[in-house]
Every structure is written in structure tokens, then in C-alpha cells.
Image (cartoon, grey):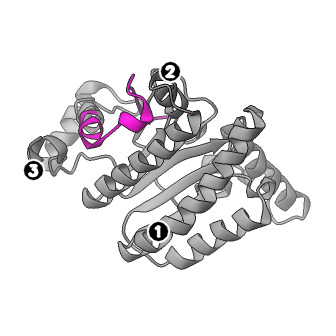
Amino acid sequence: MSAEVTRCPESENNPRHIAIIMDGNGRWAQRRFMPRAMGHQAGVKAVRAIVEFCAREKIEVLTLFAFSSENWRRPEDEVSLLMNLFISTLQNEVDKLDRNGIRVRFIGDRTAFSELLQGKIAAAEAQTQHNTGLTLVVAANYGGRWDMAQAFRAINAKINKGELESQAVDEKLIDAHLSTAGLPEPDLFIRTGGEQRVSNFLLWQLAYTELYFTPKLWPDFDREEMVAAIDSFKSRQRRFGHTGEQVRNNAAILQL
């Protein structure tokens, strides 16, 4: 495979923030008559490749849906395996991420995790907090509805304390209380595995995000697939409520 195939062409139109639901690890393994655990391990290799790609292509933020608040409903042995894999991956990868200037940030309700895992998460964030390259956001025990609910609770507490007036609550204030505060909203959402839904992921933040669905199972999602997703993003006209003519006129003015 030539380098041109797997390299995203330099462009100001590249997405700043890419969010991915990494679906299909279990099915990938089952199709190969392997235990589902092998699929999750293969999925970690795919994560490594996509993180490296995004860092090299100067993507500002990559958010990965690692474990949803609904995933606790899976068989107990699979959940246990995922938690152990989570811990071992943090142990094995954080030093490399740090050396490459990647900042790690976790979003979600981490209180449900073991003290060991909570400690690994906090340590990874602390070790990489001053890095200025790619921001890798890991959504773990995360749900979009949970995110909005915790933001509303925090705002309501401030109102009750007299720190805020209810009239001050607007979209910008809610943004500031979401777990993604300070990050740009996702430009491109990718879901692998063939399903075409957002599954309670970044519900508030995806309001104007371009959606891209692929039948590729996550362990098979490689650099070439990422380029295809980004190329699809670049081919779309993002209007944000404007007409197509307005967007074209504004673009022409910026080029003058």
C-alpha cells in the first residue's frame, strides 16, 4: 500500500475534533471463531494506529467511546475482561502517549470503577496534562444523558447557592458544565460495525456534527478507512443554518 493512500492530504478543512464509536470487536472475533476477548485485544491495536494517525495529521481532539454506561449490562466475565484490559492498556500506553506530546483526558462517571482503575485514570491525566499535541479523550462509563444531567445538577446547585440566576442559563453555560468543557465540538462522528445510531454518545455535542457510518468492524478500521471518513467530511457543505449560497459567498470573501 502506497504512503499516499494512508496519508490524509494537508488541508485547512480537516476536522478539528473526531469522535468515534468503536463497534464490532466481539463480532470480529466471532467471525474468526475466537473468544470475544481476542476481539477486544485486536481493538486496542486499532486504537493505537488511529491515535498515531490523528497525532501525525494534527487533528486537535480525538474522542473514543471506550465503555458506555449501558455496557455494564454485558456478561459479567466480559465486563471484567474489559476492566482488566483498560488497566493494562493504561499501564502500557501512557508513557508512549506522553513522549509523543499527547494529552489524555477521561470523561464519564469514574466512581463506578475500582480504586485501582480510578488511580490509573487520574495518574494518566496528571502525567500528560501539560502536553500540547493531540488531546485524546476517552469516554468511559459515559452516557450523553448522564453528561447533560450532571451539568444541569451542577448549574442548579449554583442557582440554589445564589451564585447564578436562572436567567443566566444559556447554551454557553451548559457547554461549560459538560464533561467536554473547553474542547471544540466534534466536527466528524464515525461509527464502525454497521450500526447507524449515536447510542447515547455526546448527545448535546453532536448537534452539528457530520455523521459517518461504515460496516467495517473496529479491529479492521485502519488508516485507509480513516482517510475515507475524512474525505467524506471534506466533501460536505456545513451550513449551520445558513443557505448554501451564503456559505459559498462567505468562503469566497475569506479567500480575498
Local SS, label 2: loop
Q: Which quadrant would the N terminus be assigned to in this image?
A: top left
Picture coordinates of residue 81 (x, y %)? 66, 46
Circle 3 crowding by C-alpha within 10 Å: few under 14, some 14–19, many from 20: few
* Residue 204 image-quadrant placement: top right
Q: CA distance from mark 2 to mark 1?
A: 30 Å
* Residue corresponding to mark 2: 195
Q: Nearer the viewer, residue 128 or 250?
A: 128
Answer with left or right where residue 215 lies relative to residue 38.
left
- Residue receiving disc 3: 256
State the CA–CA distance, disc 1 to disc 3.
36 Å
Q: Which residue is mark 1?
A: 103
Residue 253 lies, with reference to residue 101, above or below; the image says: above
Question: Mark 2 vs mark 1: which is more N-terminal?
Answer: 1
> Which amino acid type is marked by label 3?
Leu
Which portion, as a residue range, is magenta?
Answer: 206-228
Residue 7 seen anywhere in this rendered image of the structure: yes
Can you tell which quarter of the image residue 168 is in? Answer: bottom right
